[in-house]
Amino acid sequence: MLKLNMAPESLKAKKICVLMGGRSSERDVSLRSGRRVLESLKRQGFDVISLDLEDNLLSRLKAARVDIVYIVLHGRYGEDGAAQGMLEIAGIPYTGSKVLASALAMNKVAAKKIFNAVGITTPRYLTIEPRQKVKNEADKIIKDFSFPLVLKPVSEGSSLGVHLIKEPGELLPKLEETVQKYHEMFVEEFIKGQEVTAGVIGVGDDLQALPILELVPKKEFYDFEAKYTAGMTEFILPARLSPALTAKVQALAIRAHQALGCHGVSRVDMIIKDEVPYVHEVNTIPGMTEQSDLPAEAREAGISFDDLVVKILASAY
C-alpha cells in the first residue's frame, strides 16, 4: 500500500486512473465531476487516464499498470463500498473512504444508528418494512409521526426519491410508488430550518472542516430539482451563522465524518433549527463539478480546485 498523504511530486511518478460514470442514476453528475478532476490532474502534469465502471475494469486497470484509482463515482456500485471492495481485492490503492465507511454512509438508516449511538443529533426516523403490507406501514407512520414528514430511499444520493408528505392522505399512494421503485424506504421528521453543508478534507492531524455553505432552495426543501436546476437554490458562502455556531457545525461535521470512519474527504449535510444542528447524512464522494458544494467551500478557504484534487489524491491508500 502507498504511504498516506504522499507528497504531490512523488505522486507524479504514479499512474493514476480517474474512475467515473458508473451505473447509478447519478451517472451524468459523476461524468461531469470526473472529467473536471481528469482535466485538473492532466493540467498539473500527472500521468492519468480515465475509465468507466465496466465489467472488465480490473483487467483494464492491470493492463494500464494503474497505481492509484481516483474514485469519482456517485450512488450505487460506486459510493456504497462495491467499487472499493473490488479495488481492495485487487490490491490497488484508491481515494476516499474504505468499504465499511462507504457502505454505512450510503445507507442512511445505518448512518443514523451510528449517529444516535455516539450522541450526534439527527432527525427522528422510522424504517419501512418492504415485506409488510404498505397500508399497514402507512398506518404505523400516521400513528407515530406528525405531518409534514419526509419520505426517503435508504440508499440513494442527490435527493433522488425524496418526497415531502404534507398530509396523511398523501402518504399511502406515494409510499406505494416509492417502495415499488426503491424497495428500501424510511420516513423522517421534517425539520424546517437553515440547510447547510460542510466539507471535511485531510487525514490525521491535517483533518479540517471547510467553510460552511448555506443552501436556500426556492422550493420547500432541497430536493433533486432544487439541487440541479439553475436558479432554484441560492447559495450563501459563508453561511449566515454566528462564529460560535459556525465552530459548532464544523466540529460536528468532523465528528460525523469520524463516527462513520470516513477517510480523505466527505461532505456533511445538516439542518439547523433553534441553534441546534441536525445531521442528515454524510456523502463520502462529494461532487466536483463547477456547481458542486465542496469545491466552492474549498475556494472560500483559499484552496484552489487543483490543490483540492491533489489533496484528495494524496490521501489515497
Image (cartoon, rainbow, N blue to C red):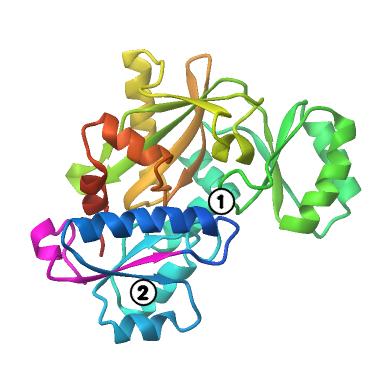
Side (left or right) of 227 relative to 255: right
Q: What element carries label 2?
A: helix
User: In 3D space, how far apart are the residues under numbered discs 2 and 1 (Cα atoms)?
Assistant: 22 Å
> Relative to 82, does residue 190 appear above or below in the rendering?
above
Q: Is mark 1 on a helix, strand or loop?
A: helix
Residue at the image point whose x is 46% and y is 59% from the top: 31
User: Which image quadrant for residue 313?
Assistant: bottom left
> Relative to 231, does residue 172 appear above or below in the rendering?
below
User: Which image quadrant for residue 63?
Assistant: bottom left
Check residue 188 in the rendering and tell me which mark sits there, or answer none. Answer: none
Residue range corresponding to the magenta coloring = 1-20
Count neighbours of disc 1 (C-alpha within 10 A) and say few if under 14, some if 14 to 19, many if 20 or more. some
Q: Quadrant of the N terminus?
A: bottom left
Tell which of 51 and 270 is nearer to you.
Answer: 51
Q: Where is residue 96 in the image (x, y as percent from the top left)?
A: 34, 57
Residue 254 shows in the view: no
Q: Where is residue 233 in the image (x, y as percent from the top left)?
A: 54, 28
Between label 2 and label 1, give the one nearer the viewer.
Answer: 2
Side (left or right) of 38 relative to 123: left
Residue at the image point whose x is 42% and y is 51% from the top: 284
Q: Which residue position is annotated with label 1?
A: 110
Q: Where is residue 132 in the image (x, y as percent from the top left)?
A: 84, 56
Q: Which residue position is annotated with label 2?
A: 88
**Sequence-wise first label, 2 or 1:** 2
In magenta stretch: residue 120: no
